[in-house]
Every structure is written in C-alpha cells, then in structure tokens.
Image (cartoon, grey):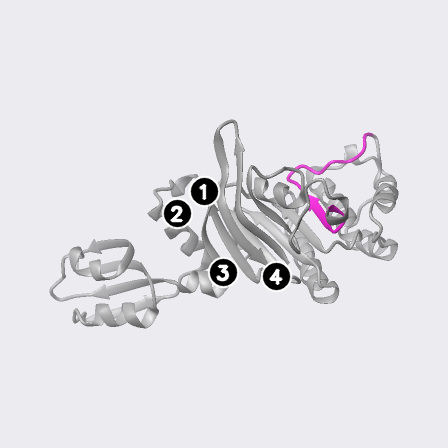
C-alpha cells in the first residue's frame, strides 16, 4: 500500500503541498485531480522519489522511495515531458530499460508495439508529441511496475489512442495487480476508469474517496414556490451555492440527499427536483466555495 502522512513540500518559500494525507490501495486506478498549480505533479515526484519531502512522509509499505533503489524499482513514472537518451530510437530505449528494470518483459513490449503503431528504429527526436508519449507508455508498461504514475496521461493522444490506453490500464490492474495513479486537470478523461479520486487545490486535499462517495455528498435542488422564501431560510443546510430566479430557487448543498430534500419539502414548494451531480460538477462547486476562478479551469 502507498501512504502519505502530513506530506509537505515547499519551493522558494511557497507551499506546493500542505499536510497532505492519503492512502492508495493496491490494484486500483487512483485519480489525482486538481486546478492548475494545485500540486499534482509535485505529489507524483515525491511518490516516485524525485523529490524529498520537507515534512511528513510518503512511501510504499511504509518505506520511502527517496534514495531507495529497491522501492524505486517498483515504480514507473511518466512525467508531463517524457525523456529519452539523445539520438536514441525506441528499440535502443527498450534495451536501456531492460538493463535497468529487472521486470522488463519483452513479450509485453512487443505486444504494445503492435498496439501503438510506432517505428521502433526511427529516432525518437523525429516523433510528434503524441508519438513520444506513446513510446514512453510502451516503455513504462513493459517494466510491469507495481506502481505506474502518469502525469497528464492522455496529453497529446488522439481519441483512439486515449481509449486504447484506458483499456490497457484497466486490463493491467485486473491481470497484474498493478496500481495506477493518474494526475489530470480533466475529470472527464479519467472519471470512468478510476476507483478512487482525490481533489487537490493549492496544495491541500479538499476531497477524497470513491467516485460515488465524492460526488454523492453534493446535491443540486431546484424548487418552485408560490410564495418564494428568502434565501436566509436555507441556512439550516450546508449550502455551497444558492440562486433565486423569479419563483425558482436553485441550490447546491452538502449532506445526505434525503435530509436535504426533506428540508426543502417542509417549505411547501409547488415543485421540487433533485438533480444528480457529476464528479466534475462536484469539483467545480468545491472550488467555487474556496473562491477559485472557475473560468481559469482548462477544458
């Protein structure tokens, strides 16, 4: 199991991560989602041992990965900009990885090379951004890591390759017990494949749990009234957002769905509807409460 306890990292006096705590169960796909600059990439670099924590700790089975080759050998980390040896081709990089990772599997490499249509003898420097990412994914997956860390995993991939990668990740977790942590600012890309989601904002963990657990805590209500109550009446609820438009009250609240609906029903609306909230909407509402400018979220 991978765990982080009070994990803190600072750069030039600015906190990139602030007392972050979480656990990642083995064999799951874990989504790490956050606004730009929220600390996602920093967290992956701490997990992989690229950075040393300034406070707290993070490790696998209680052992830190920093300066620990035996733990690092269980981790494959693909950052936002893949690195290859100068003037190398994919075949040469495969040999390099094979000499570095004891679990490198040639059959897996050959299979992935058939899935991702790349010329293994062409110089990687001639590849497009998407092709370089495909090449890096082939190498990482061929090491058959216990933990696969992906920073913006689908960046530069077309629709077909994105679907292909999703299928490979899900298949690898089921057959190999591999644990995958995907950092992204785009919930829609990873929502369907993740078992667990953590939401980061300005270095703090603001929500953590299963997909349904995170989105299921937040509910959107629309109610029509003959005598419209003042919005102050709804203070008995944990209101995240409330708007009045004529005879319609629209609100978003945290808590148990039944209790929220019962509270509003006691105000005698002519019509009441509880609308399911997607994970992306839940994240946006959480950020709005924190005062984040939603317009700056990248689509």
Residue 73's spot in the image, x, y percent?
A: 77, 48
Q: Tell me if residue 80 comes above or below residue 258 in the rendering.
A: above
Quick one: label 3 or label 2, which is nearer the N terminus?
3
Look at mark 4 in the image and give the residue it sits on.
25
Element at badge 4?
loop
Q: Residue at x 69, y 62 (%)?
A: 173
**In the rendered image, is residue 207 in sight?**
yes
Q: Residues within 10 Å of mark 4 (few under 14, many from 20)?
A: few
Quick one: label 1 or label 2, which is nearer the N terminus?
2
Look at mark 3 in the image and give the residue it sits on.
209
Residue contact between numbered discs 2 and 4, judged by CB atoms under 8 Å: no
Quick one: label 3 or label 1, which is nearer the N terminus?
3
Element at badge 2?
helix
In the image, residue 116 lies in the stretch drawn in magenta:
no
Q: Magenta stretch?
A: 72-86
Q: Residue at x 18, y 69 (%)?
A: 269
Closer to us: mark 1 or mark 2? 2
Look at mark 2 in the image and give the residue it sits on.
287
């Amino acid at each position: 199991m991978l765990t982080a306890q009070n994990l803190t990292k600072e750069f030039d006096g600015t906190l990139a991560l602030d007392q972050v705590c979480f656990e990642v169960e083995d064999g799951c796909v874990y989504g790490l989602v956050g606004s730009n600059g929220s600390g996602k990439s920093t967290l992956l670099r701490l997990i992989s041992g690229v950075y040393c924590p300034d406070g707290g700790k993070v490790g696998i089975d209680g052992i830190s990965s920093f300066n620990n080759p035996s733990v690092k050998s269980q981790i494959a980390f693909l950052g936002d900009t893949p690195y290859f040896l100068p003037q190398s081709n994919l075949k040469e990089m495969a040999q390099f990885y094979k000499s570095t990772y004891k679990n490198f599997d040639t059959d897996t490499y050959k299979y992935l090379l058939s899935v991702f249509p790349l010329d293994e003898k062409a110089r990687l420097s001639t590849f497009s951004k998407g092709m370089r990412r495909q090449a890096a994914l082939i190498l990482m997956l061929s090491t058959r890591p216990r933990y696969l860390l992906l920073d913006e995993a689908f960046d530069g991939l077309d629709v077909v390759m994105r679907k292909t990668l999703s299928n490979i990740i899900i298949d690898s977790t089921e057959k190999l017990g591999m644990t995958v942590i995907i950092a992204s600012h785009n919930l829609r890309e990873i929502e369907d494949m993740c078992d667990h989601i953590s939401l980061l904002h300005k270095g703090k963990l603001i929500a953590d749990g299963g997909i349904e657990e995170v989105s299921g805590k937040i509910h959107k209500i629309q109610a029509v009234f003959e005598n419209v109550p003042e919005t102050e009446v709804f203070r008995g609820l944990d209101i995240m957002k409330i708007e009045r438009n004529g005879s319609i009250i629209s609100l978003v609240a945290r808590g148990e769905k039944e209790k929220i609906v019962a509270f509003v029903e006691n105000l005698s609306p002519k019509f009441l509807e509880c609308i399911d909230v997607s994970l992306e909407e839940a994240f946006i509402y959480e950020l709005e409460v924190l005062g984040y400018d939603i317009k700056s979220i990248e689509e």
